[in-house]
Image: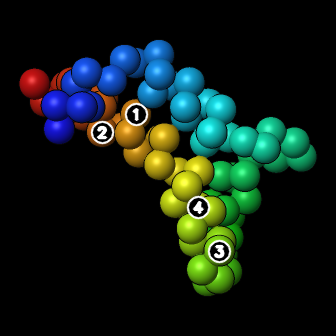
Amino acid sequence: MQWLDTLPWWAAVAAALTLGLAPFTPEPHIVEKLRMLFAGTLVRPIDIFDFALHASPFVVVILKALRMFVR
């Protein structure tokens, strides 16, 4: 997990704000996928992959924050 410590905060946050939220209009893609997840309609493999792709930058930011606070 050393790569997580060496990853700059600005890069992790920039990835979450750009890759995680793209496309920005009409609504962020991650919002659409979260609605599908909570509605139980996130079943197609392409939607699951898309959700994982857009959620991964947010997961990195969360893991980096948790690692910082635990240390």
- Label 3 and label 2: CA atoms lie apart by 25 Å
Q: Identify the disc placed on residue 63.
A: 2
Residue at the far right: name it: 26
Q: Residue furthest left?
A: 71
Q: Secondary structure at mark 3?
A: helix
Report x, y in % for residue 66.
25, 34
**Amino acid type for the residue under numbered disc 2:** Leu
Could you tell me if residue 16 is visible in this image? yes
- Indicate whether 18 appears above or below 38: above
Q: Up-down: is 43 above or below 58?
A: below
Tags 3 and 2 touching, CB below 8 Å: no
Label 2 sits on a secondary structure element that is helix
Disc 4 residue type? Phe
Question: Percent x, y for residue 48?
Answer: 57, 71
The residues tagged by marks 4 and 1 sit, at their Cα atoms, a distance apart of 16 Å
Q: Which residue is mark 3?
A: 46
Q: Quadrant of residue 42?
A: bottom right
Labels 2 & 1 near each other (Cβ < 8 A): yes
Among numbered discs 3 and 1, the one appearing first in the sequence: 3
Quadrant where the C terminus is found in the figure: top left
Is any atom of residue 40 visible in this view? no
Query: Which label was assigned to residue 37?
Result: none
Hey, which quadrant is residue 8 in on the image? Answer: top left
Q: CA distance from mark 3 to mark 1?
A: 24 Å
Q: Quadrant of residue 40?
A: bottom right
Give the crowd class for mark 1: few <14, some 14-19, many >=20 residues within 10 Å.
many
| Residue 61: numbered disc | 1
Between circles 3 and 1, the one closer to the viewer is 3
* Along the viewing direction, whichever of 65 and 11 lies nearer the viewer: 11
Considering the numbered disc 1 on the image, is that residue within a helix, a strand or a loop? helix
In the drawing, does residue 20 fall left or right of residue 67?
Answer: right
